[in-house]
Structure formats: structure tokens, C-alpha cells
Image: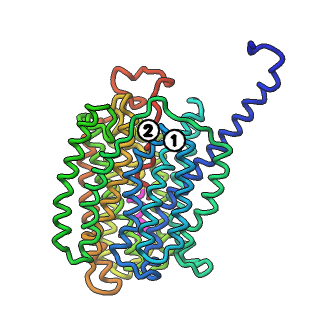
Amino acid sequence: MPPSAPTPAAPAAGAPVSADRRRWAALAILLTASFMDLVDATIVNIALPSIRQDTGAGFGTLQWVTAGYALAFALGLITGGRLGDIHGRRKLFLLGMGGFTVASALCGLAADPAMLVAARVLQGAMASLMVPQVLAIIHVTFPAHERGKVFGMFGAVIGLGAVCGPLIGALLTQGDLFGLAWRPIFLINLPVGLAGIVLGRRFLTESRSDTALRLDLVGTALLTAGLLLVLYPLTHGREAGWPVWGFVAMAAGPPVLAGFVRYERFKARKDGSPLVELSLFRIRSFAAGVGVQLTFGVASGLFFLIWTLHMQLGLGWGPLHAGLTGLPFSLACSAAAGLSVQKLVPRFGRTVLQGGALVMLAGALLYLWQAGHYGTTLESWQMAPAMALMGAGMGLIVAPLTDAVLSEVPVRHSGSASGIFNTTGQMGMALGLALSSVAFFGAVDGPGGAGFVTATTHSLWWIAGGLLLVLVLLFRLPRRARAGSLPQGEAGAPAETAPEPAAADRPALVP
């Protein structure tokens, strides 16, 4: 019947209202899931000393509490996104949220350190099913003219998660609710997750891609094996006395990763659906950007771990004291991120990112000097300038980095490139957490707080070196990102033809 016919007029008028109400309810669910994941990624570090005291976990185990989550999340991001494209994004989102909730319960009820590590790995794997669906569902739920507002809200949630994660962790840990010590940092996910599942079943609409690529299970297995051969000995080698098997495993890791590269080339020729699109690395800016993301991830992962341990084990501060000390970092990071994208990058381009690396490097060097000069008498107010510098520098880098790196990537490969880029950042964080075995725990010089202060200054030299490498790699990025991140010759493409954002998209590095 023609749309002007009088009979269906009343129902038609009411339909958009209902649809509008449903999609904004769906957005609230998606943003809550993102907030839960972001907070969970930052909430654990503040509770590590409490976990160590309560369970007797060794430092190697504490590393895996954080690194296990990061590694499982990174390895599952691209596969999780493709599973959503194939089997339905709503279905995978609900499955991931359900699994994340169950894993959170297992973390909170863990009877020993080994169970906690296993539950954290499961939690990361479930997050890799849940998180990739968020931006994909937003893309198919909201029309193009509303996405700017929606992604602005998404960015606000990222900033809120960065600020709230350490504080929530500190309050729950120091509050010792019901005598549960650190366990509420995981158990708090249960009511949120259950509500998300119930509401998600009602308000989320199913969607899938008609042209989804096939899963590359062999590639995933090779990449996982290669990374574990390197990361496991790095994490456990020091506590085990650096046995021969650790060096053999680390030596075997690069050949396995080389085999992964060869298989990906074969897979690309065979059916065009490799886990990693290797042809993208022929683009200089993308290859350099992945290097920036990896190196920045290593430096960030190492920093967030040693910073927490320095405050609590080195300076003897409680979780709440440590969490409040992190406020200058989080607030400066959020403010600088918004300023860089809206005001600075459009005017100064790549220079903003380079300035961010210099500011963050200055903050790391100031923190290094303060830790060495004041020792165990360092106060929060003295640390604040260094934290503000590091937070501001990080905000200037992470917010505009994705657009700068993807600016020369062809449109047809933008989804794959985004997935690789964000996965690389998570892998870098896992590697940084593993390297803490050498950079931090291996440098603890004597008992008491002074030994941890020495380890902190040693680690900060590693972090400063990583930031210097980031600065060098940033010179390989284009001076200015092209409008809409489109390659030349495609800049005039209409917005309606732009590709769907990568299912694996996620804020790569959050404090």
C-alpha cells in the first residue's frame, strides 16, 4: 500500500518512536558492557598486592593474572569479530557477556592462584567475543547522521572507565566488603552482567554480514603457540631459575611465528581469508603505526603494573591512597585526548603525536628522578606533576593514533587493518607485562620497600627507552591524516559507501 494511504498512518507514526526507544536502550546496554570491560582491564592492578597477601601468589603468578587476560583478549579479538559476522553479532555479544560473567564469578571464588589465572584467561577470551560486537552493532543500529553523537558518548565512556577503574578497585579492595578482600572487584560484574544479558535479549537486534570471511583456525593456533613460547618463559623463567627449557622455548618462538607468516601468505592465496592481511604491511605508515602500537603497548603494560606495585609495595600506600594518586594521570589523559582530536590534530597533524611522546617521556624521566631521589619518602603531591605529564602525553597519542595509522589504508582493507592495529596494542601490553619479570621483579634489590623502589627506577629506564622508540617511529606516519581515512582517489566517496568499522575495534590502550 502507498505510504500516503490513510489506513496505516497511525501505526506508522508510532513505529519510529518504538524503534528509537529500542536503539537507545540497546546503546545503553552496549556502553555498559564496554564500561565493564574497560574497568575490568584497569581494576585488577590496584588489587595485586592484596591478592598476593591473601593467596600467597608469587610474582610470576601475579603477572599472569594481568597478562593472561590481555593475551587471551588480544588473540581472540579478530576471531571474535568474524564469529559475530558469521553467526550473528547479538548472539556472540550475549554469549560473550554470559561467559564474561561466569568467568568473573570464578575469579571472585578462586580457591588458589592457579584457578584465578585460569579464570582470568577465560575472562579475556569471553571479552574477545563480547567487545568486538559493540561497534559493529552500533554501526548497523544507528543511521550515519547519528553515529557522531553515539561515538562521542562511546568516547566519554572510555574516559570514565579510565578514571573509575583504579578508584573502584581501590574502594572495593580497601573496603574489604564482607571480609572478601580483593574478591569484590570481580564479583561486582555479576549483577551488571546478568542485567546486560536480560536487557540485551530484549533490546538488541540481530545482524550478520553476508560476506563474512572464513575463520583461520590454523593461523590462530600458530600465532598463539608462537607468542606463548616467548611469553611463558619470560614470565616464569626468573622464579624457576632460568632453566634451559625456557631458553629453548624462547628460541623456538620466532621460527613458529615465521611459520605463521608463511601460512598466512598461503591462506591469502588459497581463499583470501587470512587472520592477518600481510599485504597491509607494504604500506609504510601502517607498518610504522603497528610498530608504534606494539611498542607503546609494551611500555604501557609495563608502566601500569610497576606503578601500582611501586606505590603499594615500595611506598607502603593502601589501595585507596594509590588509586587517588592516579587521578591526575586519568584526568590529564581524558582532557588531552579530547583536545588533541578536536583542536590540535586538525591544525598540527602528526606533530601532536610526537609532542605527546615527548611529554610522556618527560613525565617518565621526572618520575624516575623522583623515585630515585626521594626513595621511600615520596609523597602523592610530589608524584602528581609526573603523572599529569604522562597522562597528558598518552592522551595526545592514543586518541588520534588510529586515524593517522589508517589514513593511507585502502577502504576495502580498513576493517582488517583496524583489527590488526588494535590486536597489536593488546599483544604489546601482554608482552610488557611479561617483561616485568626481567625489568622489575628481576631488579628487586633487597627486602622491604627500598628494594621495590630500586626495581621501579630500573623499569622506568625500560619505559623511557620504549617511548623514545615510539617517538622515532612516529616520524614514519603521514604528516596529516587524509579526510575520512581514505586513500587518494577515494576521498570523495560518499559516507554511505564507507565500510563497516572493524569488528575488532576497541580503544587500544587505556590507563
Task: Provide residue 216's location: percent of width, then percent of height.
Answer: 34, 42
Residue that label 2 marks: 502
Q: How is the image coloured?
A: rainbow
Instruction: Provide the residue span drawn in magenta.
Output: 383-391
Element at badge 1?
helix
How would you rate the neighbour count of disc 1 (Cα within 10 Å): few for under 14, some for 14-19, many for 20 or more?
Answer: many
Image side of residue 216 versus residue 148, left or right: left
Task: Name which residue type carries label 1.
Answer: Leu
- Snapshot quadrant of residue 350: top left
Residue 170 marker: none
**Residue 389 drawn in magenta:** yes
Instruction: Please determine whether, in this image, residue 412 is positioned above or below residue 167.
Output: above
Q: CA distance from mark 2 to mark 1?
A: 8 Å
| Residue 163 locus on image (x, y percent) | 52, 60
Q: Is residue 219 above or below residue 211?
A: below
Q: Residue at x 49, y 52 (%)?
A: 335
Q: Foreground residue, 315 or 500?
A: 500
Image quadrant containing the N terminus: top right
